[in-house]
Amino acid sequence: MKIEKNTVVSLRYKLTDAQNNIIEEPDSPMVYLHGGYEGTFPKIETLLDGQDVGYEASIQLEPSEAFGEYDPELLKIEPRARFPEPLEVGMQFEGIPDEEGEDSGDEEEEPLIYTVTDVADSQVVLDGNHPLAGMALRFWVQVEDIRTATDEEIENRHPVGAEAFAFGMPDDLDDAEDDFTSAVSNPGSSSPTLH
């Protein structure tokens, strides 16, 4: 069977930066629905289209093909009093950026995940960029399995039980609850929403 639209692909991968420093090399394969369902990056889908089990390749993605350019406007400084204690660098919170200029008036705002990058006595620095934003990334991929997707998987736009291709951060906030909670240093408390 070849990879084509509406096939479920099991893919082993290794992710490195442009200097070949390993960012992620999971033990289990990533499983995604092939065919433009946003289960992986479009450039990787194009590379894999028409390939068989066992196919392996390396590919580089520029920031615009992966997690986008780094946006300094997604940095926020907030009063420390708005956050739970203990507060540590690396904790993550869901929030919606404050829009002072209404340039994106017709788009629905989606909440971002903000990472605490600095903690001072009275202020907290938060970064709403994906941790890999602005980075060129190199992927080594190997196709482990291919199967026909079920009608339910096609309707839901992802394989049953498959994890998102997120590299340490949830990319679909509807499914992010478990990933988000485990990413927060204090999983027993609810995560505040920033406004």
Image: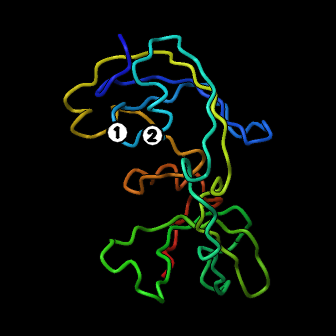
Q: Is residue 93 left or right of residue 49?
A: right
- Classify 11 as above or below 190: above
| Secondary element at image label 2 | helix
Query: In which quarter of the view is residue 111 placed?
Result: bottom left
Compare residues 150 and 124 and report the one nearer the observer. Answer: 150
What percent of the width, then of the height, locates residue 74? 59, 73
Compare residues 149 and 19 and report the one nearer the observer. Answer: 19
Residue under the point 41% across and 33% down: 162
Q: Is residue 179 left or right of residue 146?
A: right
Q: Which residue is mark 1?
A: 36
What percent of the width, then of the height, locates residue 115? 64, 65
Estimate the spatial distance between the alpha carbons at disc 2 and disc 1, rounded to whole Å: 7 Å
CA neighbours of label 2 inside 10 A, class few (<14), some (14 to 19), many (20+): some
- State the colouring used for the structure image: rainbow
| Secondary element at image label 1 | loop
What percent of the width, then of the height, locates residue 130? 59, 58
Identify the mark nearer the N-term, 2 or 1: 1
Q: Which residue is mark 2?
A: 42
- At label 2, the amino acid type is Pro
Task: Say whether marks 2 and 1 touch (CB < 8 Å).
Answer: yes
| Image quarter (top left, top right, bottom left or bottom right) of the N terminus | top left
CA neighbours of label 1 inside 10 A, class few (<14), some (14 to 19), many (20+): some
Residue under the point 39% across and 19% down: 50
**What number is the disc on residue 159?**
none
Residue under the point 41% across and 32% down: 32
What is the count of numbered marks?
2
Q: Is residue 118 left or right of residue 150?
A: right
- At label 1, the amino acid type is Gly
Compare residues 173 and 33 and report the one nearer the observer. Answer: 33
Residue under the point 21% across and 32% down: 152
